[in-house]
Image: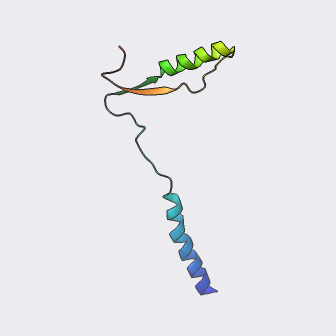
Amino acid sequence: MNRFSKIAAASIVMLLPACASTQKTTYHDAPMRGDVIGVDEQYVAAVERVARQRGTHVTWVNVPRKRTTLADAPR
C-alpha cells in the first residue's frame, strides 16, 4: 500500500500543473500604445435602428467597444 500511495501522490503532483496550464493568458486584448478603445457608435446605431423598426427597446448592459488607432480616432 505504501508503494501505491507514492505512485498516486506522484501522479497527482504531475497532473495538477498540467490542468493549471490549460488556461492561457494572452494580452492580445490589451490596448497597445496609440490605441483608443471607445464605443462602437456605428454598431450601436444599426442595432437601435432595427429595434425601432421592430418596435422594441434596447438596453445596453455592456456597450460594444471598438479599438481604433490614435490616428483614426475622431477628434
* Position of 33 relative to 46 (above/below): below
Residue placed at 40% from the left, 37% from the top?
30
Residue placed at 31% from the left, 32% from the top?
33
Most foreground residue, 10 or 26: 26
Q: Residue furthest right?
A: 55
Most foreground residue, 58 or 37: 58
Q: How is the image coloured?
A: rainbow
Looking at the picture, how far across and down is residue 23, in whole percent? Answer: 50, 53
Quarter assignment of residue 75: top left
User: Horizontally, is 52 left or right of 13 in the view?
Assistant: right
Most foreground residue, 25 or 73: 73
* Position of 71 relative to 7 (above/below): above
User: Horizontally, is 24 left or right of 57 in the view?
Assistant: left
Looking at the picture, how far across and down is residue 64, in whole percent? Answer: 52, 26
Quarter assignment of residue 70: top left
User: Horizontally, is 54 left or right of 65 in the view?
Assistant: right
